[in-house]
Image (cartoon, rainbow, N blue to C red):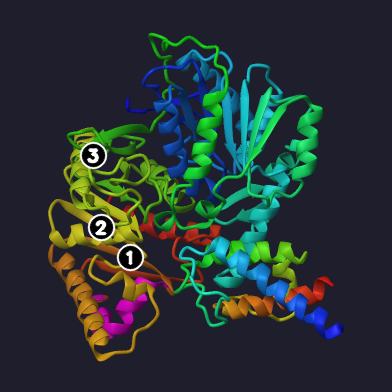
Amino acid sequence: MGELSTAVATESVEGKITDLVLEYALHAPADRPLRPELSLRDEIGLDSFSLVSLMLRLGEEFNVDLADESARLGIDLGTVSTFGDLVKLGRAFSELSR
Amino acid sequence: MLPAQPFYFGSEVEPIFGWYHTPEIPNGGGVVLCSPLGLDATRSHWSYRHLAERLARAGFGVLRFDWPGTGDSAGDDAQPDRVAVWIAGLNLAIDELKRRSGAPRPALVGLRVGATLAAQVAAEREDIGALVLWMPALTGGAWVSEMAKLHKLYLRIVPQADVPEPDGEELLGSFASKATIADLARVDLLALPRRPAPRILVVEDGVLRGAEQLRERLAILGAEVEWRRGSGQKFLFTVPHRATLPDESLNTILHWLETLPVDGAKVAPSSPPATTPFRERPVHCRVDGRLFGIVAPPVEPPPPERPAILLLNAGAVNRTGPHRLYVTMARRWAALGFAVLRIDLSGIGDTPAADGAAESLVYPRDGLTDIDAAREVLARETGASRFIIAGLCSGADFAYQIARRGGPLAGVIMMNPRTFLELDLARVEGPPVKSQESDLASKAEALRVAAGLRQISLNGIDALLVVSRPDPGIDFVDRHAPGPIRESEGLPRFVRVNISGTDHTFTTLSSQRRVLEITTQYLVRHR
């Protein structure tokens, strides 16, 4: 049961982040699920400000102040460049918000 | 479509810049478009112009304006009593629209914090027929808080020098003083004292926090409220040259306003009211009058040999420049004794695209001929016979090309050129491609830039190159032609200044001050 709920939570984190990425993407990718190595900048056209806006929404989704919490957890937001990086970030904040 | 008229209105102390869009066939209605603030205003300018044009085609008289201290209006965001001045400014805009259109009960359309301010003003009047809240901020404080968070996050993603502003907050390129923040916190849609308008349309996309409370509050106040989904916020967080118009939202607003009863005369008033004098003046260039710009004249008549300055768009951002930097520069340089024209090239800002050309292009097809036309107007308006051409990003690329061609130029100021119109943009901005062919092409392009800088020097033109480190354009050149670029730094009349700890558009206030100081010091030599 525990494993199942973790799997559902993981799926919903990925789902939430997929929805957000598609909302912000300049060029929406056709393939689903999104590849972890999908480049946010080169493949879907997010510039720095779009990425910042997306991250703010991500923090709101998980009820955390993303700037403060990422600093506290020692996460370098400057290294977030792929869909997989965002999912990792989302999982970290999902854990925090439980 | 009748051409829109740029004008200044309000007090002579702090005139407000606006456009009046005369309806083709008046339907008796009038609309005031209330822009948002800060980066939201830069990103929505194109959409607002289109909305105004569509409304005017449908028969509405439309006034769009820049809040005092923003855009092309007088003043700046560090002045006191901003919120009170904004509220007074919108009241003046409504009165101005009523005089020009004859509409007795106009509608207000506001976006983001522009909607919040519009509702506040509407609730204090009794003559607003309808109100459109487009992705409103629930309170002015919520908007400040969001922008301040975005600013802090941005500095985490694009690391740069973070110099605290002790008297307020940086909001991604603009500033809000502590007093402005406190005053904005009191502008609250949930605390509106009266019904702002009998009919209200809310356009948002399910992400407005407090939407239910807003719905309840407006119902309690007795407003008839409709709630519609629009085309989202993508146009607000996308860099202007990559953005698309939020057509669904624009058409939703247009069609909703068209369904409302209008009670104004269906004939426009015969004579428009007088405008407020202001030092700066709008000008139209090119034979067809299509090209729009604003001249900031020098505070005192300059000697005949003093060059005039032409500021070229940065990307597809309108003539006010990223973070309103061009307005700040123009006014500072005018105070030094230069005439400065900030221009919208074809398809950017308030200049329509040439026939058959697309809008919002960084390098418009007619860019070089636009610049020639702008120089002619500047010569006619100011008597100048020599020019300094300045620009950021693509504006720097055009400036470089004009200087390379030679002509009556005294100088050129290039801030963070992207391609110099020599480099392949995809190679500059895209992921590195490892191939011998790509390396050779990149080197050839970078060498052309070095040769171009030599040519500018040979043309006898002073050149200032100001670059952020790192910035993609100059980094590309430095990487692929390191030797020739180093040599260019010894060229006569060529100065390169590197600014570390900033980004492409000088988002932080400290970097804006730095680039303003560097360019101003350079100009002092040309007085």
Outermost residue, bottom side = B436
Q: Nearer the viewer, residue B95 or A30?
A: A30
Rounded to the nearest angstrom, the CA distance separating label 1 from label 3 is 24 Å
Residue B478 drawn in magenta: yes
* Quadrant housing the N terminus of chain B: top left
Residue wearing tag 1: B417
Disc nearest the viewer among 1 and 3: 1
Q: Is residue B163 visible?
A: no
Q: Which comes sooner in the sequence, label 1 or label 3? A: 3
Mark 3 or 2 closer to N-term? Answer: 3
Q: Position of residue B43 (x, y in %)?
A: 49, 49
Check the image and report above or below for B261 versus B294: above
Q: Is residue B223 above or below residue B253?
A: above
Q: What whole-number distance in Å separates the C-alpha atoms at marks 3 and 2?
A: 16 Å
Kind of residue indicated by mark 1: Pro
Cβ atoms at labels 1 and 2 below 8 Å apart: yes
| Label 1 environment density (alpha carbons within 10 Å; few <14, some 14–19, many ≥20) | many
Q: Which residue is mark 2?
A: B399
CA gap between label 1 and label 2 equals 9 Å
Instruction: Provide the residue designation for mark 3.
Output: B378
Question: Please, what is the three-letter code of the amino acid marked with disc 2?
Answer: Ala
Residue B56 in the image: above or below residue B451: above
User: In percent of the image, x 21 and y 49: which residue is there?
Assistant: B366
Q: Give the letter of the chain under mark 2.
A: B
